[in-house]
Image (spheres, helix red, strand yellow):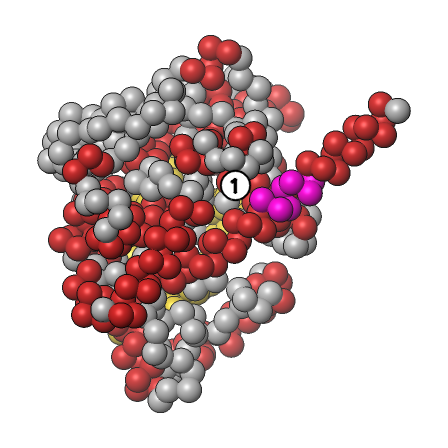
Amino acid sequence: MADGENVYYRGEGICNLVLATEKEKQVYRLMKAGKYSGKQGCNKGHRAQERSKWIHQSLEDNVEYIKNIMVPLLTDAFVVIPKIREIPQGFTERIEEEIKHIRTAHKRVQEDDFRTVDPATCSALVLPDFCYVTDISTNTCISSSAPDAFPTISVEIKPKKGFIPLSALNNDSSTMKTGVCKFCMHQRLKAKEGRWTTTSHYCPLDLFSGSRARMRHALHGLCVTPQNNLKICQNGIEVYSEFMKNEIGKILQQFFGDSVNGLKNGMRKQLEVQTFVDLIIDALLYVPKKSEIHRSCHTVLKSSNRQTKDSPCVAHRKPVQTVYSQHCLNSSYKVNHEEKSEPSSLPHNCVLDRILHVQTLDQMDIEEIHPLYVKVKEHFASHPQDSSNWNLYGPFTQETWLTPCLEDPLSQPDPESIEFAVNQVKRHNVSKTAQDCSIMVAMQQISPNTSSENNDMVLTDSYGRKYIFSVVIIDLDPKPVDKIKKYHRQQSDIVQAFEEEQSENEAEDGTLND
């Protein structure tokens, strides 16, 4: 961090506080206290020097995981490997005091979310500021900051789980058989717990469908109920989210500039929103032309809900077999019979395609994964040496973590073996990373006179206006293996909350019919 650099608050999650630098156009991710690693052994009771060492080790684990697992699976066209950088002593305490007044209220009142950064922190993960258009190959900002330049708009989307597992569809639970995706079911639990006042209008299955109509519906749903799944920034400053709902018409008016064909007011706003949403869809469906594609070999969804075998993973291999789109019965988008069985039109190797394929590494439901996890824990308790041999808690090498994700399903170990259980737990955790990742789309309109012949990253709207853009996947941290216990408990709570609401709705319908 350069001396005299202006640093400001960008946001935070349960595990990290994110700061941005104005001149360098970089973001610093500071790990919150108590979130050091999936490994056990370090807590606030340890000396500052020990905690500092653990924090640095956790950051190294994160970088290793992204480099060895996420980049091969998601490709270097969408993933940037973060760097670890030292920060000045006392910096974290000073910056937290400075930003205290702007941290969102819900982060301050929810103890599980609001954790301060450990004063022992002496290093942070550093990435380019993807709120600006970024050349991924060089990690440099290419957004223009000239006085007459159009503003750069960034859209951060947390898409969540984009499919219903085959095991869930075949589960004996009547709730699961309804064909409602996990995100929509989870909304009932969040409403019950008071986390959100309104259930989301968004359904991930619509966004991952590849159908432009369904994708538009999904993005409009995110705009209506952003929750923590949508955030829009203008020149790096948050302007639209669940907690910052500025007039989106004014934001887009600055982004697009003068009105088209003299349209103004309501009609102009409607057209600008439609154009903006279409640009986002174009970016999400964009296929990089100059990237080394590492295709993973794993089960894919078919319309018949059968599992099929794919060929071994090699660079530049042909696309995997078509993934058929699914429909969530909770989605407000009503599909016709033909749409229910149409193949997904997600272009191979677009960002959504890559994320979905990594998500589908795990076709098991948590009810199936949890017993395997328990089996592994019991085995490690009686065979401690195997714990280090299989590296379940790291290090995250390609041999021990990527290989299980690329294995042909038919060549995997005996389902009764401990090796099979370990591999499935790893696939589950890699899948969870892709389910909780975020997509950053940044766009800036360029002058009609600007040459774009040598730039592949240019979008054109229906009015002929051109935009440079970038698409990046972030939030690719490894999930703590022992969090499977929490996922298992949470799934039971989700099902219970959803079934309770169904029962209440059925009771109300019965009363109305009497």
Residue occupying the point 38% across, 20% down? 303
Q: Nearer the viewer, residue 437 or 149?
A: 437
Q: Is residue 109 left or right of residue 18?
A: right
Q: Quadrant of residue 105?
A: bottom right
Q: Label 1 neighbourhood size at 10 Å, few (<14), some (14-19), many (20+)?
A: many
Residue occupying the point 13% across, 53% down? 399
User: Which residue is labeled 1 in the image?
Assistant: 183
Outermost residue on the bottom side: it is 47
Residue occupying the point 58% across, 44% down? 495
Residue bounds of the magenta highlight: 495-501
Position of residue 357 relative to residue 136, above or below, is above
Main secondary-structure element of the magenta-colored stretch = helix
Q: Quadrant of residue 47?
A: bottom left
Position of residue 297 relative to residue 282, above or below, is below
Residue occupying the point 53% across, 13% down? 336
Amino acid at dot 1: Phe
Q: Helix, strand, or loop for circle 1?
A: helix
Q: Is residue 434 left or right of residue 189?
A: left
Q: Work out whether residue 6 can be spotted.
A: no
- Which percent across, then down, holds residue 221? 57, 33
Q: Nearer the viewer, residue 239 or 394?
A: 394
Position of residue 489 relative to residue 356, above or below, is below
- Which percent across, then down, holds residue 371? 39, 53
- Which percent across, then down, holds residue 478? 32, 57
Outermost residue on the top side: it is 338
Quadrant showing the N terminus:
bottom left
Position of residue 146 relative to residue 66, above or below, is above
Whether the magenta-drawn stretch holds residue 233 is answered as no
Q: Is residue 242 left or right of residue 74?
A: right
Q: Work out whether residue 306 can be spotted.
A: yes
- Which percent across, then down, holds residue 119? 41, 81
Q: Nearer the viewer, residue 70 or 386?
A: 386
